[in-house]
Image (tube, grey):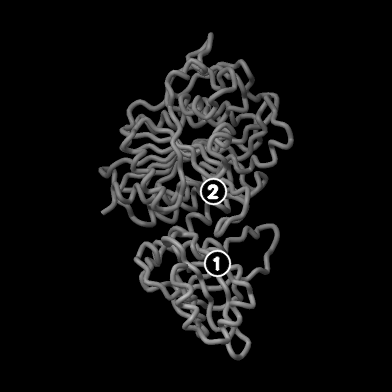
Amino acid sequence: MIPYVATRADTPPKPIVVVEKANFDSWLSAQPEMHKGWIAAQGFEATGGKSLSLPGSAGDIDAVLFIKDGAWNIWSLADLPAQLPPGFYTVSADFSEKEATEVATGWSLATYVFDRFKKSKKEFATLILPDAADENMVRRTVKAITLVRDLINLPAGDLGPSGLEAAASQVAGEFEAEQTNIIGEDLLTYHFPMVHAVGRAAADAPRLIDITWGDKSAPKVTLVGKGVCFDTGGLDLKPSSAMLMMKKDMGGAATVLGLAYMIMDAGLPVRLRVLIPAVENSVSGNAFRPGDILTSRKGKTVEIGNTDAEGRLILADALAAADEEAPELLIDMATLTGAARVAVGTEIAATFTDDDALYAEIAAHAAAENDPVWRLPLWQDYRHILDSKFADINNAGSGGFAGAITAGLFLKEFVDTAKSWVHFDIMAYNNRARAGRPVGGEAFALRALFALIRDRYGR
């Protein structure tokens, strides 16, 4: 079932009449006088994306006028579900399969409401699935993005490390994937010391979630997601204003779970592995401290310059474990730095890779999917910022400059054998409402990455 997208109507659907902006005047001249007068009375301007309900003789809606100016994309009709009265609607347009699929996907995503704690009585208009659309792809994408949004929107009191483990188990269980959870002191036994150090101060024990799926002989695709379920900053405590959004600090983990869902649901011929270090960065008597030196899974020693730079520590252990298998493609997703938000804002996924060909593919799919990314450099000359007098590397560095880049350089130290690696530093949250994208948790670069993996490794 796809929310507010149906394959048949219980009542006669109203048509959404698509008119190219350039053809509006000629279209208008052919309309009944009643519609001409109504359009004029509304002061309607035929600009791209605008719509207007046209009245019928009985006072109901006869049709909906929609002005198209440019190519279809996933958000083209996403304003309409909330604007139109509840009921069934069809779109009269000559869609390609991709266009029809995207328009239906965007329509359904526009009806998303996080109502776990505040029930909503809002009802939306229902779209009849266009004939050309891939129904399975619409369902798959909507379910994956809804999963990501729900997980990010949940408060940390309802989604700590154990709750994130349970959410991962639901995804893995649906596809009979194998899952291993390494919890608490076992992290030391199985060599995830920095995951343990970051999470040991919390009441909900830290853990490493490890999911595998697919033919062992298939190309290895590994996803690593930062699962900091709440970040106080540790002993380098954040101010209260900076903690308000920290329930979203597991947005990388949520996003890789959504991407994993799509890969498994589509049955892509890959050997998928998902690694999620899940922790709370809390304060107690056994919290890790500034100045501590941790020995990572890879053996590198890390001086703690700031306990609020914890995400890269847990990612480093997980990336080292992923890298031991030399995957064909290694992707990590993390709400890692405020510096990335300064650099590219809150609506673009900052992207780091030293593989030019891989980034070219990512950028092409991001443009095609309307799922924006922007590459920032892994500028090796900045590596000195992470130098430590007492350890192999410092987790925070000095000077305060190039924070997103130095975070990427830190992670790069733990990736040696993967054929291709890309790091995404994401917001994972919509600060403003846009068509199909309400304020709250959001899946950044998910659709672009699924398209990349499908095209690289698909049947």
Q: What element does badge 1 sit on?
A: loop
Q: Which residue is identified by label 2?
A: 166
**Residue 145 percent coordinates (x, y):** 50, 54
The answer to whether residue 184 is visible is no
Q: Position of residue 50 (x, y in %)?
A: 55, 67
Name which residue type carries label 2.
Answer: Ala
Return the residue nearer the eye: 30 or 187.
Answer: 30
Q: Position of residue 78 (x, y in %)?
A: 53, 63
Given residues 413 and 427, the one toward you in this image is: 427
Q: Which residue is mark 1?
A: 50
Residue found at the very far right of the displayed protein: 240
Q: Residue at x 60, y 76 (%)?
A: 86
Q: Is residue 386 visible?
A: yes
The amino acid type, in three-letter code, at marker 1 is Lys
- Dot 1 or dot 2: first in sequence order is 1
Q: Closest to the observer: 443 or 99?
A: 99
CA distance separating discs 1 and 2: 43 Å
